[in-house]
Image (tube, coloured by chain):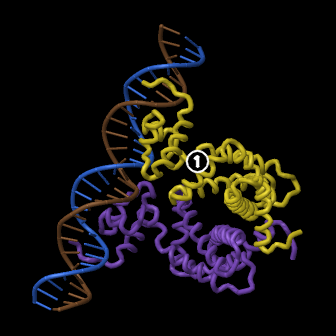
Chain colours: A purple, B yellow, C blue, D brown
Amino acid sequence: MGRWQPGTRARLHTAAVRLFTEHGYEETTAADIAEAAGVTERTFFRHFPDKREVLFDGQDRLIEAVARGVKEAPADAAPLDVAVSGVVAAVEFFDEERRPYARMRQLLVDAHPALQERERNKLAQLADVVHRGLLDRGVTDPAATLAAESAVVVFRSTIAQWLREDEQRPFDDIARETLASLRAVAGVPVG
Amino acid sequence: MGRWQPGTRARLHTAAVRLFTEHGYEETTAADIAEAAGVTERTFFRHFPDKREVLFDGQDRLIEAVARGVKEAPADAAPLDVAVSGVVAAVEFFDEERRPYARMRQLLVDAHPALQERERNKLAQLADVVHRGLLDRGVTDPAATLAAESAVVVFRSTIAQWLREDEQRPFDDIARETLASLRAVAGVPVG
DNA sequence: CAACCTCATGTCAGTTCCTGTCATCACTTA
DNA sequence: TAAGTGATGACAGGAACTGACATGAGGTTG
């Protein structure tokens, strides 16, 4: 039947965000989204493995950015610095057209446990990428895992702070500040 | 109808673990578990909010143990030490009848993304408890969050290492070792 | 140009997860 | 003994997915 429509996936994504914010996440069915995008429910699930995933479309590019950031970190940097360099590279992701979008999305996610769960999942993927990057750099494994996961902790805290300050200050400034805080918290206040 | 049966919840839990390991997680339906426990599917969902949750029954006691651990940490300890004291208090949880059980459960969880998602959720609750405990102790908020989440990182890594060593060494020994590793990774000069 | 191939989509049937609602029965308390 | 409580059964139903098969558009090859 239907002739081919360009950007079906993108249309599903934007329709989903709109319907979710207008009527709520649980109140919006996958069929509703599909209809709003002019396709069938079945097509929705061909593009996204489940309903939640539609909100996380495009995160692959963030993952890639982070991987690149880790790879391009200075060779003599400490593991945690390398890891955080990775997530700081996510600036390029948040500095595009996505700004106003990011806050709206975050509101949605924060309001629904099911979506928070999925978000943590994505952050775990981020940790995995950083982890692999560190292994490639020769960092051995207990340390690599710890550094990668700590970097994600810094990442989360940085985003939260960035949004709290209404995206005024540069993302990477806050990231470096957060990293310093983590070091302070970790205990030893040495210069 | 039915006369009251003691321990319905526990019976559902053990039946679930058995069926999951025998036939797989996705292959086992909630109705199967209910039937094996001698109740209705509806009753299953009265005891557990969803199918995954049945595998995490009893985690409340772990949460409580961690909260207690944070509360009882020495007054002059650094935030991260307090936080880790909390998760180290989870020893009492892993030192009971649960040892052989823990490994089997972990195999199940590791094999199914949906269950990993839920596990991360539980760990987030752990972080919340530690976070609240730190706030009660007067630690201010950016630091409290960072310490709490770092403690969870230590916790995860510790469990993994503990299982890797076949539960030979004491849990809290490994935890302290992991904490030292984290400090080294963070580039904090050890005191 | 026709036969062919690929690929996104539509259609339909079916399963599983999960929920609301009401009835029932054992046990408890007044 | 009457009323209340609490766990359960029975049933209906919605929403999230999945598998199988058909269709039609566009590009490729002879």
Write the residue at 77% across / 57% down.
Answer: B84
Write the residue at 65% across / 69% down.
Answer: A152
Task: Indicate the position of residue A147 as horizontal and vertical percent values.
Answer: 70, 71
* Quarter holding residue B57: top right
For the residue pair B123 and A144, the one nearer the viewer reads as A144
In the displayed structure, does residue A91 sit left or right of residue B72? left
Task: Indicate the position of residue B96 as horizontal and vertical percent values.
Answer: 70, 42
Which chain does tag 1 point to? B
Q: Circle 1 — which element?
A: helix
In the displayed structure, does residue A162 sit left or right of residue B47? right
Task: Indicate the position of residue A25 as horizontal and vertical percent values.
Answer: 45, 58
Quadrant holding the C terminus of chain B: bottom right
Write the residue at 59% across / 66% down.
Answer: A124
Write the residue at 45% across / 49% down.
Answer: B23
In the displayed structure, does residue A83 sit left or right of residue A3? right
Quadrant holding the N terminus of chain B: top left
Task: Indicate the position of residue A141 as horizontal and vertical percent values.
Answer: 69, 71
Residue A170 in sight from this viewpoint: no
The crowd level at tag 1 (other Cα within 10 Å; few <14, some 14-19, many 20+) is some
Amino acid, disc 1: Phe
Count how many numbered circles sit on residues in the image.
Answer: 1
For the residue pair A24 and B2, the one nearer the viewer reads as B2
From the image, tell me which residue sits under label 1: B56
Residue B167 in sight from this viewpoint: yes
Up the image or down, B38 lies above or below A72; here it is above
